[in-house]
Amino acid sequence: METVRQRINRSFPWLLLGLWLLGSMPLWSQPAAADSSNYFRATRYYEQKDYARALEYFRNALGAKETFVIRNPQVYFKTSYCFYRLGDYEDAIAGFLGDASRVERVEDYRHFFVLRARLALGDTLGAIISFREFRRIYPQSPLNITADSLLAELYFQQRNWSEAKVYYQRLLRYRGFDEGDIYSKLIIIADTLRENDDLKDFALTLMRQHPFHPGSKRAYDQITRLYQKSVIQRDKLNEIFRYLGKTSQFEAIDRLLARQTARVGSETEQVRWLKIRKLYLQNRYQETLQACREQRGRFSAGQYLREVDIHIARCYLRLGSTGKAIAAYDTFQKRYPRDGLAAEVLWVIAGLCEDRNEIEQARAYYQRLLDHYPYCEFISEARFRLGLTYYRELDYSTARNQWAASIIRERDDEKRDRYQYWIAKSYLQQDSTGAYLNTLNGITVEPFDNYYTMKAFLLTRNGVQIRQFVDSLLWEMHHKRISYLPQYLEYFQRPLLVQDLLGERYAQRELNMAAGSLDKPNWEMVFALGEVNERMQNYGRAYRLYRKVYLENFVKSDWREWMFLLKHLYPLYFNGEVNRYARQWNISPASIWAVMKKESAFEPEIMSYANAYGLMQIIPPTATRLSGSLGMELGDVRRLYEPNFNIQLGSFYLSQLLHRYGGNLYHALAAYNAGEHRVDRWRKIIDTSDDDFFMENIEFEQTRGYVRGVMKFYWMYHLLIHPYKMPEDLVSFPEKIAHDPWFKELEGLE
């Protein structure tokens, strides 16, 4: 027969869920005698991590034998945990071992904190034995990850290097640990054990993957010591050089190459090339060009001849000698027609010809690209650019014909919308307003699909229509709330219970394990998993799950079918920080959310391949400069993982760029992604009177896609948080021409 305690434990997650579904109001703020309840006060302080006060009120509640305590046996577990956090380990052990603190489903946590308390009391040897045994007793517990990390540290402290190495390497398989710290420990272990091959591997991996980590300097010192009297292998020398170049340690490069030359006995082609490459990394382009031209004849290896030739072209371009750069790039393509860069070189030449207003030559290079590399990544762009060259020359009919022919070959929906959007713009240039509106309306059926469909939708609706549209979205978002958590609660009972007992950090590992155990979950279950992650403030994971639901189930559906997802696809995460810094820097919060969504998908602890950190993806040199401007010191780059600090720097940087470019968000976003120096150059050679034309002429596809994506996000966020105010950079076409003589023609179309 089920006991009262078992019924309470079984029903607790449902009680917790009910409180969640009531809203975000915390438990202690409920009105029924909350102020006088010892339990509610204790809970408030417990969640605030004020364990001393929490313990005081928990004791009062236990002494009074209040009804709520009897119905919530978790209070005994929490009391024991308070003792543990306050350093009263004897009482913590006694509490956790008592039957009163036994909570169904989380026996492993009781056992775990007993072991932690004993370890804190100095029983290191016993703790090691017990933590190893813990994995055998609870093989499925997420706490095994924490146990492994503790064992790694304990073995390291005891100088049991072999065991420490095993456990640190095991930690590399888990998420949530600082890889830089782990490799730093492995370097120390390998050095102590004189395992030089492993030491080299660990050091080079740290330098390659985490060049700005504090441990990378020690890794470089170890590598230098290991190769003090020996020649560095070619691939290793390249890796070390890349690390030093990325971290701007140019004097160290000189010493490295000098030592390599002394050990070999002569200057190798590799060393000779790396000296030239160092000049280029230092932006010493004239010296680089001179060295390339003077030394080309001294190279015999094809790989270095290739590098010299491509750098000659790059240096001419950096020095402003565009004609010579075009000739050098052309020579490179003819000399190395099968090189991985050959197609891109033709793409670059065509763009440079356009910059020089040599349109016929540009078209010839685009056509050469289409003829010689029909399967390269630039094919679709080359077709679009051919049409744009005619548009640029005001030959709108030929531009339309070019784009119309390209639509037939294009399978990507967004690129087809792009062609249609520009066909519409060509009609507008010829005052064919009816054709303009009809063409734009043709791509507004699914306005949320991409930049072009969203902008077309906003341009073809007047202010009243936009307000009605946004009102309907807001109504759907706030009055048709959908939750699948109750339906799938059984899968998440343990994570929810752990969250109540110990907070989000432990609960998240429970949730990750629960998610991994789901066998081919349907979208409703994935949505429920997103809900739980959102409640636990794991915003990056929550957003990715909601995005997964959309992409795998609704991306081809009518937008009205997935409006329940809209607030999850455009969430207002980190609302306090975003609004605080938006006010401080006088920019729209919509722009901050849009950048954050595009850069990191709301994941705070993330680092890109380019060593950009955190929510707004800031690289260390930029972070150092911004911190200095704000009178702060960056210190450890891992501080960029802190949401508040990252948003402060990122929003400040965005405000600086907006100020630099007169409030033009297109230009500011291009600079955020590609750098101010490039945007300054583009603004000199590209017509900036048309934001679309500027964007399409950005040199890099990655940056073009970035600006398109962020602008779409910005418009959506702006409309959702300012439903009665159109974005200042986007006034609808109907409102622009409301008083124009053609207006009657438009009325006739409707």
Image: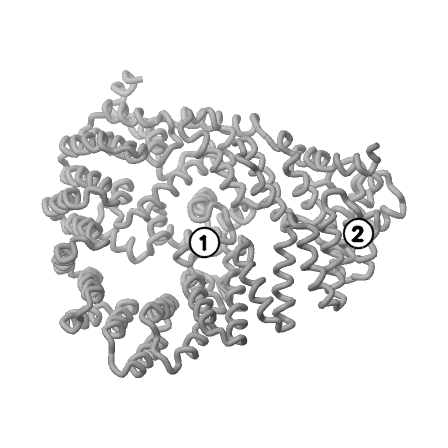
Q: Residues within 10 Å of mark 2 (few under 14, many from 20)?
A: many
Farthest residue to the front: give it.
136
Which mark identifies residue 79?
Answer: 2
Q: Compared to 496, does 622 lie above or below? A: below
Q: Is residue 315 visible?
A: no
Q: Compared to 155, does 528 lie above or below? A: above
Q: Quadrant of the C terminus?
A: top left
In the rendered picture of this protein, how many numbered marks are placed on residues?
2
- Quick check: 174 left or right of 317? right
Which mark identifies residue 486?
Answer: none
Front tag of 1 and 2: 2
Which mark identifies residue 650?
Answer: 1
Counting from the top left corner in percent of width and height, residue 281 is at: 29, 67
The residue that appears at 22% across and 48% down in the rendered structure is 686
Label 1: which secondary element: helix
What kind of residue is marked 2? Thr
